[in-house]
Amino acid sequence: MRILFRTEGGFAYFPGLSAERRIDADALTDPKRRALRRLIRQARFFDLPERVGVPKRCPPDCHRYFITVIDDEDRVHTIMTAEPVADSRLASLVAYLQALDLDDDD
Amino acid sequence: MPNYAILPPFILRHIVRAGDAEERRRAQNTLARDRVIRSARMDLMANMQDVVVMTPPPPKGRRGRGLRRTIYVFKPHSRRRLPGQRVRTEGKPPTGDPAVDEAYDGLGIAYRFLREVFGRHSVDDHDLPLAATVHYSSKYSNAFWNGEQMVFGDGDLKLFSRFTGSLEIIGHELTHGIMQYTAQMNYTLQAGAVHESICDVMGILLKQWSLGQTVEASDWLIGAGLLMPGINGAALRSMKAPGTAYDDPLLGADPQPGHMDDFRRMQHDNGGVHINSGIPNRAFYLTAAALGGNAWERAGKVWYNTLCDKRLRPHYGFKRFARLTLRSAAELFGKQSIEASAVREAWAQVGISSLEGG
Ligand SMILES: [Zn+2]
């Protein structure tokens, strides 16, 4: 399973943080991979519409997220969502992806 | 192996029909992602064309009620709704939670600043109660205005610390609120960069006023102290020297230009609103530096007057905004005043000239 994650917008623009992050689940440690799979399942990611709670005009300084998941059966789904992410399960997935972004050790 | 990301959609659709399994999979992936990215781009374009002047919403507050603050704490695990749980209201003692108390104090300073310097009664000029939510989400590295209130994250504590720690960020977010009740500037391209710059200007003025700092004493940094130790940078933006705030392996290098020659055309960041804002930011700094003393007394009055000016339209870019600042300076201080010539000269130094007429 692979995940592509990109954050757009926010209080400031940082070149180093604006690139799309590619996460290969196989490269993660076992607990992280399991957590990620669980979060994707709980968010019912493949059943989500392409836009989840994205207003026509995003508020100033607001983050928007683009998430693509390619699962082991090669199903692919991309969604866009925006802060505040009202769906708590999707919010958990976003928070996890953000935290993974910070880890150097995987 | 072709790069699927750059193939035109009609070729990708052909591959989906005719390719082998691997080719088909890759093409489908790219098509699906493109659809979502296109949808985001259409938002941007729709906002760009959105030059209709909307009348600002009627004030929500009641003039004369004075300062009323409410600080909330976000509850990520119950209902993920803003504002969250109320933890400190007006007149209540400190809670001991630094984020709560920083937000409370910061909003108080901001209210007094608007009132004493500009005669403005809160965000809507009618004593709109000020609300802020802190501890938003988890390790959240951002602050924003959601149309009704401010929202602050605690930072990831690796790159960023608490967003309530910088008074200029509180002032910046509050000014997004003021813009909603005044100029309603667009949030894309040059107009968006003007919008962003006005928020930085008000943010830095708030900090300078609260510290009693002159133009010379100020660091002119937005988000000073926000970067964690070990990150190579002083702040998120520098108004005095755009492009010099940070240069770090993780964050990259500060991309802000300080002159029209380096203006950046891009799709990210709503068309570079937090990048090209460096140009009008520096024009403000240069105006204030030329006048010396307290920036809020003269340069700040000119900019504030401009943001309240009914002639400022939501889609105005740098040049038309610059013209209005010059008109404001002339109206406030006189056509031949040193304030007016400081404004004219400052814009010329960032590559925006011929402001008379139009
Ligand atoms: Zn902003």
Image (cartoon, rainbow, N blue to C red):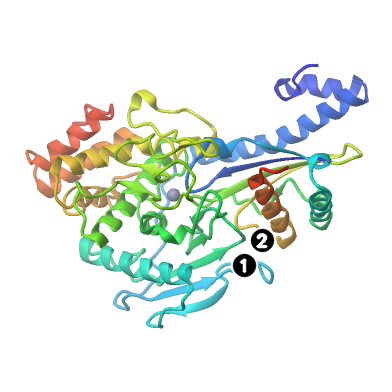
Snapshot quadrant of residue B285: top left
- Residue at 60% x, 54% y is A83
- Asked whether the beta carbons under mark 2 and mark 1 sit within 8 Å of each other, the answer is yes
Q: Amino acid at mark 1?
A: Arg
- Residue at 31% x, 76% y is B66
Going by the image, does B235 lie left or right of A103? left
Q: Which residue is mark 2?
A: A86
Task: Using the image as rendered, state which of residue B273 and residue B74 is in the foreground.
Answer: B74
Query: Where residue B258 sits in the image (x, y, percent)?
Result: 33, 32
Q: Amino acid at mark 2?
A: Ala
* Disc 1 residue crowd, few under 14, some 14–19, many 20+, Cα 10 Å: some
- Give the distance between the C-alpha atoms of the residues marked 2 and 1, in whole angstroms: 7 Å
Discs 2 and 1 carry the same chain letter:
no
Quadrant of the rendering where the C terminus of chain B is positioned: top left
Q: Which mark identifies residue B69?
A: none
Q: Which mark identifies residue B81?
A: 1
Quadrant of the rendering where the N terminus of chain B is positioned: top right
Going by the image, does B108 lie left or right of B266? left
- Residue at 55% x, 69% y is B83
Query: Where residue B91 sits in the image (x, y, percent)?
Result: 37, 82
Task: Using the image as rendered, state which of residue B40 and residue B49 is in the foreground.
Answer: B40
Q: Assign a secondary structure to mark 2.
A: loop
Mark 2 near ligand 1 (CB under 8 Å)?
Answer: no
